[in-house]
Image (cartoon, grey):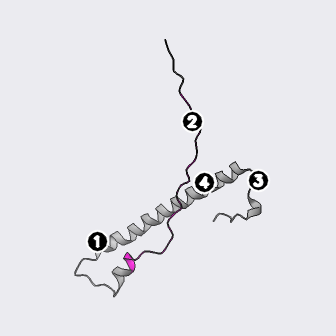
Amino acid sequence: MPAVLAPSDLPADPDAVRAIALEQNRLARALWEQLESLKHRVVQPDRAHAGAGSERLPGQAERLAAPLGLPPPPAAPKVKRARHDRKIQRS
């Protein structure tokens, strides 16, 4: 498990802080996608195996379909890129 950063652990350079924030955002997004994939893997086999006539526990379908209450992942920040104009070559 990665160590938790304290404010005193952050570098003074804003670009370095930005890089850390972008990496944390990338990790959060990857974990969110992994969670969604795992939820799908758990629900799909259960639905395929448990047909309409199979035995079920009361409330089982509702528990599997209910959202977990996790907040959505943060949106990827827009990074301002430098504009490069093409040089027109005339012959």
- Of the numbered discs 3 and 2, the one sitting upstream in the chain is 3
Q: CA distance from mark 1 to mark 4?
A: 39 Å
Secondary structure under tag 1 reads helix
Q: CA distance from mark 4 to mark 2?
A: 21 Å
Residue picked out by circle 2: 83
- Of the numbered discs 4 and 3, the one sitting upstream in the chain is 3
Q: Is residue 77 left or right of residue 35?
A: right
Residue picked out by circle 3: 12
Give neighbour class at mark 3: few <14, some 14-19, many 20+ (Cα, 10 Å). Answer: few
- Residue sticking out furthest to the top: 91
- Looking at the rendered structure, the kind of residue marked 3 is Ala
Residue extent of the magenta highlight: 63-85
Which residue is rendered at x = 30% and y = 73% of the image?
Answer: 47
Secondary structure under tag 2 reads loop
Secondary structure under tag 4 reads helix
Which residue is rendered at x = 36% and y = 81% of the image?
Answer: 62
Which x, y percent locates residue 28? 55, 61
Which x, y percent locates residue 57? 34, 86
Where on the picture, by quarter, is residue 61?
bottom left
Residue picked out by circle 1: 48
Q: CA distance from mark 3 to mark 2?
A: 27 Å
Q: Is residue 55 above or below residue 12?
A: below
